[in-house]
Amino acid sequence: MSAAEEVVAEGHEAVEAVPKRAMTLGTGTSLLVLAALLIVPVFVKNFIIFQMTMLLIYGLAVLALNILTGGSGQFSLGQSAFYAVGAYTSAVLMEHANINYALTIPISAAVCFAFGYLFGKPALRLSGVYLALATFALATAMPQLLKLNFLEHWTGGVQGLVVTKPDAPFGLPMSQDMWLYYFTLVVTVAIYIFSVNLLRSRSGRAFMAIRDNEIAASSMGVNVALYKTLAFGVSAGITGVAGSLGAIAVQFVAPDSYTITLAISLFLGMVVGGVGWLPGSFVGAAFIIFVPNMAESISKGLSGAVFGVLLFLVIYLVPHGARQAAILGQQLAGKLRKN
Amino acid sequence: MPAMHVRLGALAAALALSAALSTVASAQKKYDTGASDTAIKIGNIMPYSGPASAYGVIGKTEEAYFRKINAEGGINGRKINFISYDDAYSPPKTVEQARKLVESDEVLLIFNSLGTPPNSAIQKYMNSKKVPQLFVATGATKWNDPKDFPWTMGWQPNYQSESQIYAKYILKNHPDAKIGVLYQNDDYGKDYLKGFKDGLGTKASMIIIEDSYEVSEPTIDSHIVRLKSSGADVFFNITTPKFAAQAIKKNAEIGWKPLHFLNNVSASIGSVIKPAGFENAQDIISSQYFKDPTDPQWKNDPAMKAWNEFLDKYYPEANRADASVMYGFIVSQGLVQVLKACGDDLTRENVMKQAASLKDFEPLGLLPGVKVNTSPTDFAPISQLQLIRFKGEAWERFGDVLSSDVGG
């Protein structure tokens, strides 16, 4: 049993106590965060808006992994492959078929859902670390597949594809960055609400039943094969949407953008954010975006080592990630109120 | 070094004269974001971590060189504030860092950012923001495209120019050759291959076998065996240093002795030839445009002395066998030259204008006869190379300095 599985199991205990809080933030806090996300861009530079957009995009990708691992208990190191498929779907449709960027996003979602679902089928025979290895293979293969000669006409091969950034529609007085940010925010909020509801629904309970005990779940009538592949499909679909948005925000896709490092970063984000706690996905995304920059500003030559030390600190001090920090914070607030 | 001072002095005098002759308006100081009376902010993006981190040395060398320039009084009295960020060779990260440099740090220009995919990722952004993306550290051919990308300029001889030079040599000296090509399956390898085929033109059928390898392969031995069995008698070796050394060694092991062309990327004695064994590398042909610091023939060369003095004082921990250190030393001189020529008109437009009017500029470290030349229609600063042949323990230059300008 790996450390991550333990985290998942403990998450389950929390589910019994306060079912809603275990997965999400309270309504008040959620609205507060949303309000902040809506207002902040008006006051900051375009560069910060761009970083916030990337935060939402990586947050979505971590969220997708969270549904898969935190929800159904399956591991994946292959998220970068789904992210790449989403990114390339959007880029190719936008640049070669002149399809509107907004329309490419549901198409990416559908393509990645199908891809994830199909990949999930054979992967069903594997579990735990073996599944992680199979998805790892997918992540390693993806950059090379994108370079294949017969795909080169569409993917631009190793040179990649440049994507045109959309302007704000209806003549809105907004910079491209700000428009893209709000567009991403709407997509993110929609997917977040969908995910929360998914995990609370019958399917979500089936995911968790499989996560906690496969045999018990199947004896209760849960179609294990169906729900496992479904979790894979949903996760891949959301990752694909993140990939699409990422391609539009970065304005460039190339095989080198979607290496195994990305998959590991997403995995890291999930652990730091708290496995199974959806809002943590965005905290995790912030970690993978900003902490390397912090590490670099501390020491250029040893940025990798500094990053490692910071990661160690997080794992030792708050092993359950941001969720643990949030719970501690809540308890502290509660105590203060009593006094 | 004294020669350099004389030339700079002449240049300064010329500038002063032209300033005096021109109208009062143009003598006024003009600045864009990132430049002021006291400082010039220069941005840079390097892979200090990740798969290409070996090249991070270039950024460190440049940082040291600008420290030297600042210690000597700066450029026209302005200090260089060199801000260098790590992108780990990942294009999305490059975009983030480039935006940080342009929008948050507000640099005047981005200088010598490294790698083809990272630079491709920011090219459109830099051009739409009209911020110079000056002297990019990649040999891809597409940077020489002033019409579509007037804010992006290359630096070193591009891959296609180089392989065309080999193609011309083969057509002239070995018209009946059967050529085997081994290339790395990425942008770099394919760019070389394209230039080579273009150079052979209608005779491209001389290539009887093309074989490619992936960077992730631990060894390329099997590819060499396959090439040998094809019966090729000319071998064009488009590989990065580690693989180049393997290829040279394997050739000797299996007794394959074709006429061996090795791309400039792997022409380093310290990191390729020596590990492969001097006796195995005899008669290999390659090309060069700057002096290999490990080559004994430059031991008493004034440029090499200047380089050593600079490293002693500002970058003592540098590995002097690393060609990247020499590369950083040369390209930094290029930037200093451009900024000096800008005088008090430090606008982005003027930076590009000055960068596009370098005439026969010879930074220390280039081979004799190789000069930096640009024009409004030629954004490939260095496009000259000299063929070299390995003899004994050093490269021997032969023939004239050859040039071949290929546009993107």
Image (cartoon, grey):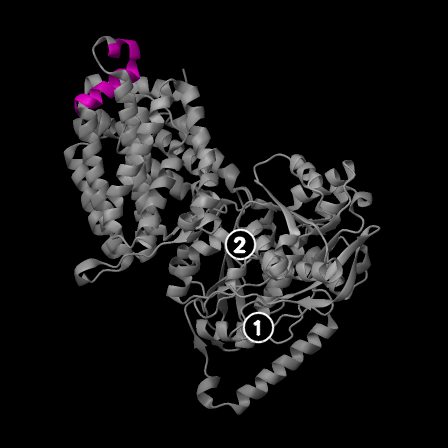
- Dominant SS of magenta comes to helix
Q: Which residues are magenta?
A: A201-218
Q: Is residue A202 magenta?
A: yes
The residue that label 1 is drawn on is B374
Q: Nearer the viewer, residue B322 or A132?
A: A132
Q: How many marks?
A: 2
Residue A18 at x, y = what percent?
Answer: 19, 21
- Name the mark nearer the viewer: 1 or 2: 1
From the viewer's perspective, tell me whether residue B26 is left or right of residue B401: left
B187 versus B225 height, above or below = below
Q: Are marks 1 and 2 in contact (CB under 8 Å)?
A: no
| Quadrant showing the N terminus of chain B | bottom right
In the structure shown, which secondary structural element does the residue marked by tag 1 occupy? Answer: loop
Residue at the image point whose x is 37% and y is 24% from the top? A75
Secondary element under disc 2, as helix, strand or loop, is loop
- Whether residue A282 is visible: no
Residue B361, image quadrant: bottom right
Disc 2: host chain: B
Q: Residue at x 20, y 51 (%)?
A: A39
Picture quadrant where residue B59 is located: bottom right
Q: Is residue A139 visible?
A: yes
**Where does residue A321 sit, x and y in percent of width and height?**
34, 29
Image-quadrant location for residue B255 = top right
